[in-house]
Image (tube, rainbow, N blue to C red):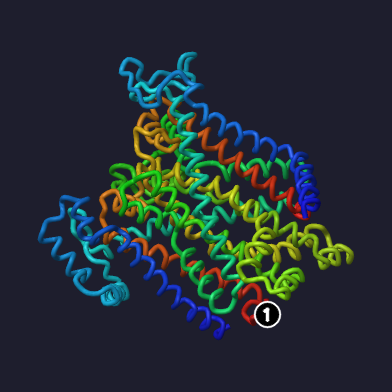
Amino acid sequence: MSFRNSYFYSVFWQRFRGNRFAMAGGAIVAGLFILSFLAPYITPYDPATIDAYHVLLPPSAAHWMGTDELGRDVFTRVVYGARISLKVGFVAVGIAVAIGTVVGLVAGYYGRWVDSLLMRFVDIMLCFPTFFLILAVIALLEPSIWYIMLIIGITGWMGVARLVRAEVLSIKERDYITAARSIGASNARIIFRHILPNAAAPVFVAATLGVAGAILTESALSFLGIGVQPPTPSWGNILTSGKDYLEFAWWLSLFPGVAILVTVLAYNLLGEGIRDALDPRLHR
Amino acid sequence: MIAYLTKRILMLIPLLFGITLITFAVIHLAPGEPVDMQTAMNPKVSAEARQKMREFYGLDKPLHVQYVTWLGRMARLDFGRSFAPDNRPVTDKIVERIPITLSLNVIALILEFGLAIPIGILAAVRRETLLDKGITVFVFLGFAMPTFWLALLLMYLFGVKLGWLPISGLHSLGSDQLGPIAWFWDLAKHLVLPVGIATFGSLAGLSRYMRSTMLEVIRQDYITTARAKGLSERVVIYKHALRNALLPVITLLGFSLPGLIGGSVIFETIFAIPGMGQLFYQGVMMRDYPLVMGILVIGAFLTLIGNLLADICYSMADPRIRHGRA
C-alpha cells in the first residue's frame, strides 16, 4: 500500500512540476498565505488607523498603493484583506466539500430512492440563482464574516455532490469492493476505507477551483456592502470606496482588483494543474 | 415528442414544490418570528402593519397550515405588499421590472453564444498554435476577472476619462423629447457597458467548453471517415463536427441562466439599471421581506423554465434523448 502510494505521489509530482502555469499558481497561493500571516511585519501601518492629514494620496515611496479617503494605507489594507479572502475561500469550500461529499457518498452508495431523493434536492438547489439565495439569507441575518462563509458553503455543495456520486457509482462496481463485502466489511468501512480515498482526487480539484469561486463571491458581496463590514478591510469593500472616488483616486480601484484577479487566477491554475497531473488523459 | 414533453413538464411539479419548500424554510430561518425581525430591522413598520403581516403569514397557526396557505397565495402570484414607503403589491413591482432584466440577459446570452462558439471552434481547430494559446490566456483571465471590478475600470475609462459612454441608467435626461432613432441610439449607448460586462462574465467558460467538446468530436471515427472520403476541411468542420459539438452546448444554455440572473444584481446596481436585480438589492438593503421572497421564487421559476426550454431544444436536436436512449 505504502509503496503504491509513494509511487503515485512521485508520478503526480513529476507531472505537476513539469507544468509551469500550475507551479506559478501554487507559488502565488503559497506566497499569499505567507504574506497574510506576516502582515504586521510587512507593513509599518495599521489597517484601521485614520490619518486626516494624508487623505487620498497617490502611490508614493511611503504609500506604495496610495491612501484612501480616511488616510489609511491602501497597501496595508490590501495585505490584511488577503487574510479575509483566504479565510473565506478555505472555510466556505470546506463546508461545501463536507456537505457535497456526504450527500454524494450516500446517494451513490445506497442508490434507489435515497439516490433519487437526494439528487432531486440537488436539482432544486440548482434552480435558485445562487447569488439571489445568498443575498436573501444575508438579508435575514446580521452581516458577519462567519455567516458569509457558512452561506457560500451551503449554497455551493451541489457540484461536489454530483461529482462524488458519479465516482461512487463507478467505484462500487469494482472487484475490490465486492471482495471487501464478501469478507464481511460494514457499509461504513466500505464507504470510508475503500470508496472515499479513491474518489478523493476529483474532489480535491473541485475544491481548489471552488476556493477561487468563493473568493470572487465574497468580494462581490463586500463590494455591494453586505459582506465583510468596514472597518475590517476586504478587497471587495476597498473597491466600494474605489467606486465612490473613481474620478479622483484610480489607485483605490486598481490595486484591490488586481489582488482579486491574481489570487483567483492562481487558484484556477493550481486546480487545473492538479487535474492534469492526476489524469494524463486530459492532457491535450 | 409530445410524450417526451408531457413527461418533462410533469417532472417540473416536484421541482416547483421543492422550490417553494426551500423558500418557505428560508423565511422561517430567522430567529423568532419573521414579523419581529422585520419590525426590529425596519422601524418604519408600524404596529398596525405588523399585525397585518402576522395575519398575512398566519403566524398563529401551525407550520403546515402556514405553508399550505402561503402556497395557495403563491399559486395566485400574491406575494403580499412591499415594506417600502410605496406599499405596493410585490407582484406589480416585480412584473414591471422583469422585461428589463430579461431583455438585457437575452441580448447578453445571444452575444455570448455568438462569440463563444466561433472562439471555441477556432481554438480547437488551431490547437496548440499561438492563437489557441492566446485564447487560453484570455479564458483564464476571464475566469478570474471580478465582473464588478471590470465594470469599474470600464466606467473609469469610457465614462470618466474618454467620456464616450454614459455610465448610469438606461436613458439620458429628457430622452423622451428625442425622435425614435435618436432615442434608440441613446438607449444603445447606455446598454454597451452593462451588456458587454454581462456577456464577458460567462464568455470564458463557454468558449472553453466549446473548445473541449469540439476536440472531443474531431477525434471521432466519423470525422476521420469524412476526411478519408475527401471532403474539404471546411465541410468536415462546419457540417460534420460542429453539429455534434453544439449539442452539449445547448444544455449549457439552461445552466447559464441562474448565473446571468444572479449576476444582474451586480451590474444593475453598478449601472443604476431599474431591473429585477436592482430591485432585489434594494429589497435586501431595506429588509423588504415580501419583496425578497417574491423575487427568490420568481428567479427560481424563470430558471426552471429556462432549463425546460434548453431540454426541449436538446431533444429536438438529438432524437436519442426524446426516445430515452442516451
Report the front residue among A24 and B200: A24
Q: Where residue A14 sits in the image (x, y, percent)?
A: 79, 42
Q: Residue at x 57, y 30 (%)?
A: A34
- Residue extending farthest bottom: B3
Q: Say what amino acid the circle numbered 1 marks.
A: Arg
Task: Tell me the quadrant of the picture where the C terminus of chain B can be found.
Answer: bottom right
Badge 1: how crowded within 10 Å, few (<14), some, or many (20+)? Answer: few
Up the image or down, B294 lies above or below B271; here it is below
Q: Label 1: which residue?
A: B325
On screen, residue B118 versus residue A142, left or right, reads right
Q: Where residue A148 sits in the image (x, y, percent)?
A: 41, 48
Residue B270 in sight: no
Q: Where residue A19 sits in the image (x, y, percent)?
A: 74, 40
> What subunit carries mark 1?
B
Up the image or down, A15 lies above or below A67; here it is below
- Residue extending farthest left: B48
Q: Where residue A124 sits in the image (x, y, percent)?
A: 47, 68
Q: Residue at x 66, y 50 (%)?
A: B119
Q: Residue at x 44, y 21 (%)?
A: A66
Residue B287 in sight: yes
- Residue B233, located in which quarter of the rendered image? bottom right
How many numbered marks appear? Answer: 1
Report the front residue among A211 and B133: A211
Q: Residue at x 19, y 71 (%)?
A: B60
- Residue B226, located in which quarter of the rendered image? bottom right
Instruction: Determine the secondary structure under disc 1.
Output: loop
On screen, residue A190 versus residue A147, left or right, reads right
On screen, residue B179 versus residue B320, left or right, reads left
Task: Tell me the quadrant of the picture where the N terminus of chain B can be found.
Answer: bottom right
